[in-house]
Amino acid sequence: MDTRVEKKKLSLRERYHLMTRGLGWEPTYQPTEKVFPFTAYEGIKIHDWDKWEDPFRLTMDAYWKYQGEKEKKLYAVIDAFAQNNGFLSLTDARYLNAIKIFIQGVTPLEYYAHRGFAFAGRHFRGEGLRVACQMQSLDELRHTQTELHSISVYNKFFNGFHNPLHWFDRVWYLSVPKSFFEDANSSGPFEFLTAISFSFEYVLTNLLFVPFMSGAAYNGDLSTVTFGFSAQSDESRHMTLGIECIKFMLEQDPDNVPIVQRWIDKWFWRGYRVLTLVGMMMDYMLPKRVMSWREAWEIYGEQNGGALFQDLGRYGIREPAGFRDACDGKDHISHQAWLTFYTYDPVAAFHTWVPSDAELDWLSAKYPESFDRYYRPRLLYLREQQAAGTPVANKNLPLLCNVCQIPMFFTEPGDPRRICYRESVYEGERYHFCSDHCKSIFDHEPEKYVQSWLPVHQIYQGNCFKPGTDPTAPGFDPIKAVLDYYEINNGRDNLWYDNSEDRRNFEAWTAEARGN
Amino acid sequence: MSHRLNIEPLGVEVEVEDGQTILDAALRHGIYLPHACGHGLCGTCKIQVLSGEVDIGNANPFALMDFEREEGKALACCATLCDDTVIEADIDEEPDARVIPIHDFSGTVSAVWNLTPTIKGVRIALNEPLEFQAGQYMLFHIPGLGETRAFSIANSPAEVERSGEIELNVRLVPGGAGTTYIHERLKVGDTVEVTGPYGRFFVRKSARMPMIFMAGGSGLSSCRSMIRDLLEEGCDLPITLVYGQRNRAELYYHEELRRLAEDVPNFTYVPALSEERGEHEDAFGGFVHEAAAQHFGGMFAGHKAYLCGPPLMIEACVTALMKGRLFERDIYFEKFISAADVQRLRSPLFKKI
């Protein structure tokens, strides 16, 4: 009667195993070291590739079906948003400057990640790891594309959206994310995964993704929010890949521990420096704010990161060398960055402004220890000068850190009144750094970082003018020539929000939409 | 009202309260389901509903697509039960795990004796045969309190079958109502109720690897049951028990274990006394993890390790084992998830240790 039939079905794990693990083979007509030249040269010792634990079990056929459905949903929302002039329900057009930073500085990184994971998937041994990298490579390409499509709706109406990929390769502040990812992509496959999958996607991702996507949700940007939802189900796969990779390296050989530690030190700090832009976005650029940078750092950096490094302690890994200094910076970096961008807004492809009184009070409440003492007076001075018709613009080019490529505006840990300068001499040349940690990254691999393409140096060397430009011509304006080379529309893409075309248009259009 | 949830491929049944998510219920029963965001956005905890009915709750449409909803998929982190339900989850099958239904037993106390100044031995003759895996525990219903306490079975399955009795080792928790009752009021002839067997702490026999047992306090009970079970079955793999107490008076079953080590060539016994360092020639002075590190020369790779004892001991042992190159896949202990554990912020680095 009710006899229980013995189950013949494969479990999810067995099914996945059969659809991935059988895909590899041992090369016979070329030596393995020649087919996989990068698996050993970083010094990471792997004894048993089969000990790799698949962090997720998605087979390629399911992957296509799943992603195809997600696209359908996303593009339906993007279309509806565009057709109904969704931009009119944004809190304020100032918000769009956060999205400009996203499309200029983050979207191109998705494309770099696509390339990086394709490389890693090619060069790792072990089918589990290779399949995981291949899927992530496809995810990242899809993210590039869907981000461009989600955000492109604004290009029709607002400035600063029309040339992000051209800017990414040239504009000074975009060399910060660009050099970060090129550093990772020019590493070996294990360092690449430690840099991107572990340090960035796992340790720091909540500090990048959550602020941008919650910021979009808070400020009426349905298009970007929907992109965020469609990407989040991929992001969790990406994070687990990073965790598995770290565990795999640490468990395979004790000699891997110091190598991984150095990578964690390096990539924690590299990622943290890039996040300065996010901190500034959270504290200054969202008309309706989600939380302060300091609060986000305390939750995602100090609490979650603290728990992670406590657990990693079992492997003999300690917290990253720069962790304490990063915690010290939580009261300062967003303000220091915004003040710098304000004074360099004539050469940036987005707008800055002095916060309103209510916003200044929000900042005082969120930063009781630092804001009123160090930053409010400077912002009030900027406001005063702007009202007088003499906005403070910095016409000199700043000294950049040779590693993170951020202008040298960060202050000494423990002393926010003194700029932090470090330097090293290598083969007779002097190199400058914003911190002990950027200096130590350089000192470990100077051959790599002497090649940094530093935008300020390039401008001074005359490499950032269009062909045919004559710097000796009478009345030559170097700033205008650089903007021309950048293809930033002077007077529309750059300068302060208050007098911008974006502001005039948004106010006129919303008045028209809401009045008679 | 609560519903029953059967989790395949484990075949384990758990009780799910009204409004409690599948993920929460599984984790509280010590069953790890893969998960990440915890609120329906990422899709890591996707499960297949095989029968019954669930409310899929607040699952995001991108994390749980329409076609998946039609296929009966759900997200464990936000799905609740509307009926008794069977799900299949993405978890490892354990070839050594046996599925034994949980039963209520009544029994008669046949012996109560002092094992140490703080630990009592209790033997209970059960009214019907009990099947269990060495390492599992029973819930003891404290008379008049309306509450239960968990105690591992200290004798082997074969001995339970022969005698019809289970042995429990109960340490007096100062101020604890349950253990105080057992220490002060329980007597031979009392009728008691026990329910079980519970837990997923058992020996991975099919791995055929040398074993290290690390026990502290009354945690010796499950290790003793497991070791006796292995030896009765004729296991010839190296078995090492590292067993710690604060002082000699607390080191119960010391003589029995010492003799066992003399008689059985593949069994090694390493006692450790944390408060009497350097006072005894036949015991290591220090903690269990220190004794183990010394005995194995700091290298544990190539073993399976089974841990039972107070949380601090477990934590120290896991750290020592990992330092000695033995990792999560080879370390086992019973995870009693307390309210404090749920509160504590953990990284997703480890699944069970």
Image (spheres, coloured by chain):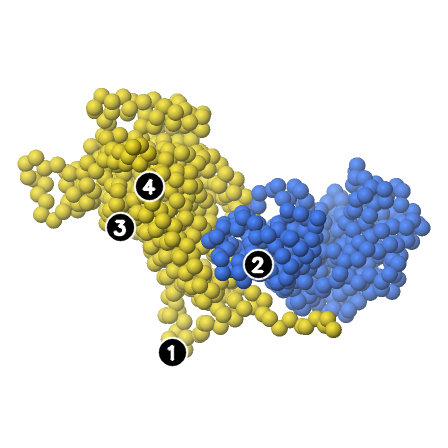
Q: Secondary structure at mark 1?
A: loop
Mark 1 or 4, nearer chain start: 1
Q: Disc 4, disc 2: CB below 8 Å? A: no
Q: Nearer the viewer, residue A122 or A345?
A: A345
Q: Earlier in the sequence, mark 1 or mark 3?
A: 1
Of circles 1 and 4, the one toward us is 4
Q: Which residue is mark 2?
A: B47
Q: Nearer the viewer, residue B11 or A73?
A: A73
Q: Chain of mark 3?
A: A
Question: What color does chain A have in the rendering?
Answer: yellow
The residue that label 1 is drawn on is A29
Q: Which of the two discs, 2 and 1, sits closer to the camera?
A: 2
- Look at chain B in the picture and name its colour: blue
Q: Amino acid at mark 2?
A: Ile
Establish if A155 lies above or below A125.
above
Are both tags, 1 and 3, on one chain? yes
Q: Which residue is mark 4?
A: A87
Dot 2: element: strand
Going by the picture, which residue comes out furthest to the bottom?
A: A29
Please, what is the three-letter code of the amino acid marked with disc 3? Answer: Leu
Q: Is residue A281 visible?
A: no
Q: Residue at x 26, y 50 (%)?
A: A165
* Chain name for mark 4: A
The chain to which mark 1 is attached is A
